[in-house]
Amino acid sequence: MNLRDKNILVVGLARTGVSVARFLAGRGALVTVTDMKSEAALADHMAALAGIPIKWELGRHSDATFTGSDLVVVSPGVPMDLPQLESARQAGIEIISEIELASRFITAPLVAITGTNGKTTTTTLAGEIFKANGYRTFVGGNIGNPLIELIESGEPIDQVVAEISSFQLEWITSFHPQVAALLNLSEDHLDRYASFQEYIDAKLRIFENQTQEDFAVINRDDTLVWKYAQNLKAQLFPFSRKQELDEGIFHTDDVICFRHNGHEEYFPTAAIRLEGVHNLENIMAALACALLLGCRADETFETVQSFEALHHRMEFVRQVRGVNYYEDSKATNVGSVEKALESFDNITLIAGGKDKGGSYAPLEQLVRERVRHLVLIGEAADRMAAELGQLTDTHRAASLEEAVKMAAAITKQGGTVLMSPACSSFDMFRDYEERAQRFIAAVKAL
């Protein structure tokens, strides 16, 4: 792909935009960066590009800038329905995402992992497995480093493992992973997508350019995932924690079994540190991605055994007076909370935050069966109370700190206090990490 002297527009100057702009300029492109934020708001990002010849269009988007470009590269946070993008599309300008740009330069095998929940744990674990097997491995995408930074670095790489979001898949054309995994599908980002179906369609694009030589790692237990998997061109390789599979990877009697082309490998789960049913699924997906691309069973399982939970994903905080406290701030949608509730009994659930537009109905049975007390916070409290409040003992708290004190007062010995919000954090906190730290501090202050 020849970029020299091409007029290329980068839309959005967050971390991905900075990396893309630097890469393009390094390849001789004439780079313009546009962002609706002001120069003052973008000062740190602009400083990262100091000394690089870039034209800036800040605080606005101009139709003429978009339609006058040879190529437009869109950062993940930029909505597809931006009017200027539509103008460029109608003018016949090629519009691509950062992962599409990077993929045109990647020569190593690519594992791409998506889903509503579990992406980061699965991607991180798969990357560690490849490294333990001796592969020079780049792990990035929607976590850590943008894929384009691999190309910019010029480092020799044997394997690429990437977490991929629905936003990143919106503007692909030839993005082609040798192994693509879809972990699960539940309502999310309905503040961006017009419908759940639109969100699903974006996720499914991860398989769009695969062939019969490639693998699609699929959650057999997720009804929606399995439904849409039937039309894929790649070889289906399912994982399941509920049923035995003739071909695939599954859990039964405290053992994970990998079956492929008549060959079997067994991995006992007793020594695995990762807790929760959701992590059992993440482990099987990571194992499948790695073993299908030649990783050895012994080195692979040693890595799985020693791997521990990532921060803010069902992380144990401490025990106070016989009650265990878990922080699950990354659970910003209903599907993630479902998996958390399946992992415990006798729960005091702290939930709420900024509503994302999906239904809370999928939680009804689990709340009825497993949640003894429900403590609600944030903007979504009224709606969550209306949909779930009648199912269990329900309380309101004005702050997260008050919610923790309330939970401590009403939870009996042997119970679990779980902060798993089902909402984003932006009504009360900077991000989910700040929400997590505030919860941890409140628990430690008990």
Image: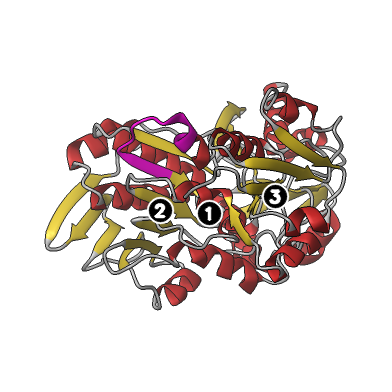
User: How does the figure colour the protein chain or chains?
Assistant: secondary structure
Cα distance in 3D space between marks 1 and 3: 27 Å
Q: Which residues are magenta?
A: 150-161
Mark 2 highlights which residue?
281
Mark 1 highlights which residue?
339
Instruction: Judge depth for marks 3 and 2 and give the one in front.
Output: 3
Location of the C terminus (image quadrant): top right
**Pick the front one: 127 or 98:** 98
Give the secondary structure at mark 1: helix
- Identity, as a three-letter code, of the amino acid under mark 1: Lys
**Pick the front one: 17 or 255:** 17
**Mark 3: few/some/many CA within 10 Å (<14, 14-19, 20+):** some
Name the outermost residue toward the front. Answer: 5
Cα distance in 3D space between marks 1 and 2: 10 Å
Horizontal and vertical percent position of residue 202 = 58, 65
Horizontal and vertical percent position of residue 237 = 30, 64
- Identity, as a three-letter code, of the amino acid under mark 3: Gly
**Mark 2: few/some/many CA within 10 Å (<14, 14-19, 20+):** many
